[in-house]
Image (cartoon, rainbow, N blue to C red):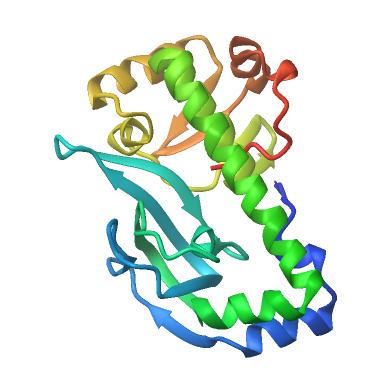
Amino acid sequence: MVKITKETFFDELSEEEKQYLLSQGTEISVQKGNSLFFEGDRPKHIYFIKSGRVRLSKTTVDGKVLFFQLKQDNDFVGELSLYNNLKLTSNADVIKDSILVRFEREVLEDICRVNGAIALAFMKRISIHSNSLLAQFRDLIFCGKKGALYSILIRLSNAHGTACEHGILINKKLTSQELANYIGATRESISRILKNLTKEDVISINSKYITIKNIEYLQEHLRCESCPYVECTI
């Protein structure tokens, strides 16, 4: 199997700049089940994930939980709060034991003021992050439940995919309920769509691991060839 790689924040920086930036934070261990911040909090910290997994979610007015991003190794969490003191618009829950570097928000802002390369790297990451969210919400609004699920499967394969004999294995256990939470649908409706995709040999599911056997089928439905966004992840 071959791990599918994606560009990371530190690809934009020299090794010296990377080590300098990491030295300005505090390394912490956070166990699965804890939260880094909650929707409505004032931003105090920004986190870098050395290893682990953090999920961003939002609670709707009727109490439903909507997942919209899954952060993993080499990702930042909370970087959208740089240079603003607006209340946070999401929850950040640790879903896998994680090693993080925690930065004071003001410290990172000061670093960006004096180091153009680091500031530029953050600007690029924030732009990619924002465009990815816009594309994700576009698929959710305009493509219906089926299209939104196809979009999430593609994004998960790009973020957590491993090339294998039969296609792309999403290297993360996924339940119908979890997928439903990404698109605001019911578990039953997602189960039906997954069952149809399995019948059509587009995907296979083994012990909650999904292998996408025909990603072109999903891409053609969404007309991915005309999408302007380069980094299609979650």
Picture quadrant of residue 161:
top right
Q: Position of residue 127 (x, y in %)?
A: 66, 48
Q: How many marks?
A: 0
- Is 121 displayed left or right of 71 in the figure? right
Q: Position of residue 162 (x, y in %)?
A: 65, 44
Picture quadrant of residue 19:
bottom right
Q: In this rendering, does residue 102 appear at all?
A: no
Q: In this rendering, does residue 125 appear at all?
A: yes
57 up-or-down from 31: above or below: above
Residue shown at 50% from the left, 76% from the top: 105
Can you name the residue that lies furthest to the right here?
A: 14
**In the image shown, does 117 or 28 lie closer to the viewer?**
117
Q: Position of residue 169 (x, y in %)?
A: 58, 39
- Is 43 displayed left or right of 39 in the figure? right
**In the image shown, does 58 or 53 lie closer to the viewer?**
58
15 up-or-down from 54: above or below: below
Can you name the residue that lies furthest to the left here?
A: 62
227 up-or-down from 10: above or below: above
Residue shown at 52% from the left, 31% from the top: 136
Q: Position of residue 140 (x, y in %)?
A: 44, 23
Residue shown at 36% from the left, 58% from the top: 88
Residue shown at 58% from the left, 47% from the top: 160
- Is 218 displayed left or right of 138 in the figure? right
**In the image shown, does 198 or 120 lie closer to the viewer?**
120
